[in-house]
Amino acid sequence: MRLGLGRPTSYAREDFVVSGCNATALNLLDAWPAWPGGRLALVGPAGAGKTHLARAWAAKVGAVVLGVGVTDVSLLRGRPVLLEDVDRCAADDALFQIINMADPGTTLLVTGRTEPTLWPARLADMRSRLNALFVAKIEAPDDVVLSAVMVKLFRERNIRPGEDVLAYLLNRIERSIPAAREVVHRIDDVADAERREITRVLARQILENEEKTLDLFE
């Protein structure tokens, strides 16, 4: 009988997997506080590790972590600031003020899935500020990152799959973190419901069943 005892997500820097797809972004982040204008935009696809790196940075430097929609920025001067997912909201007056006050003391880290030049902005001044942000980009995950992420996702569910399971999945799933998360979730659910060990055979059956389901709708 398997117990649903998951592990909390870790944002510790030592748990971040470094590879060719993120090393450049990591080096730029580590250049803090010597960011051009005291500002840096960390961008990359969903699940690429932006939140992991941003939260690890915030913990290291004692940054204020703001939610989207903050209105009072008066206490932020002289402190590092983190604001995530800026691309998924309309750039507001508060963000404009934070960008303007950013300097080597009031450093600003923002994150998003796309380049700042594509982020929404209502005012021409805000558009120019976003376009001028220095960018650290995380590329789509390579084999090193995707494999490590699957190990981490399984570990959070207290599962230790064999190397053959990981190798099989790595060669057959979509090359994205959301896809890895979804297949780990499916494997865990099926193994639990059918009281089966997590093996390469089970992984193959799940992927083949999903392919048959997709074929029905094509």
Image (tube, rainbow, N blue to C red):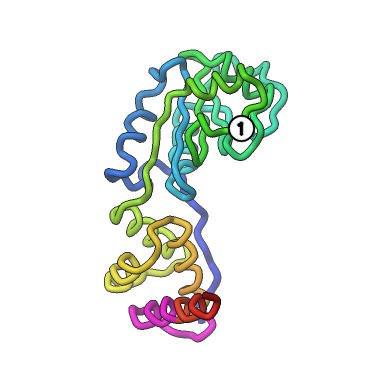
Q: Is residue 39 above or below residue 52?
A: above
On the image, the x and y values in percent for residue 181 come to: 47, 61
Residue 109 seen in the figure? yes
Horizontal side of residue 71 vs 76, given as left or right: right
Q: Is residue 116 above or below residue 181?
A: above
Horizontal side of residue 218 vs 93, given as left or right: left
On the image, the x and y values in percent for residue 65 come to: 58, 32
Mark 1 sits on what residue? Answer: 120
In the rendered structure, which segment of residues is drawn in magenta?
192-208
On the image, the x and y values in percent for residue 162 come to: 30, 72
* Foreground pick, 128 / 206: 128
Q: What residue is shown at x 45% (from left), y 67% (from top)?
A: 184
- Indicate the quadrant where residue 87 lies: top right
Our reading of the magenta stretch's main secondary structure is helix
* Foreground pick, 170 / 8: 170
On the image, the x and y values in percent for residue 193 come to: 54, 82
Q: What residue is shown at x 67% (from left), y 20% (from top)?
A: 73
Is residue 209 on the magenta stretch? no
Q: Is mark 1 on a helix, strand or loop?
A: loop
Q: What residue is shown at x 30% (from left), y 67% (from top)?
A: 171
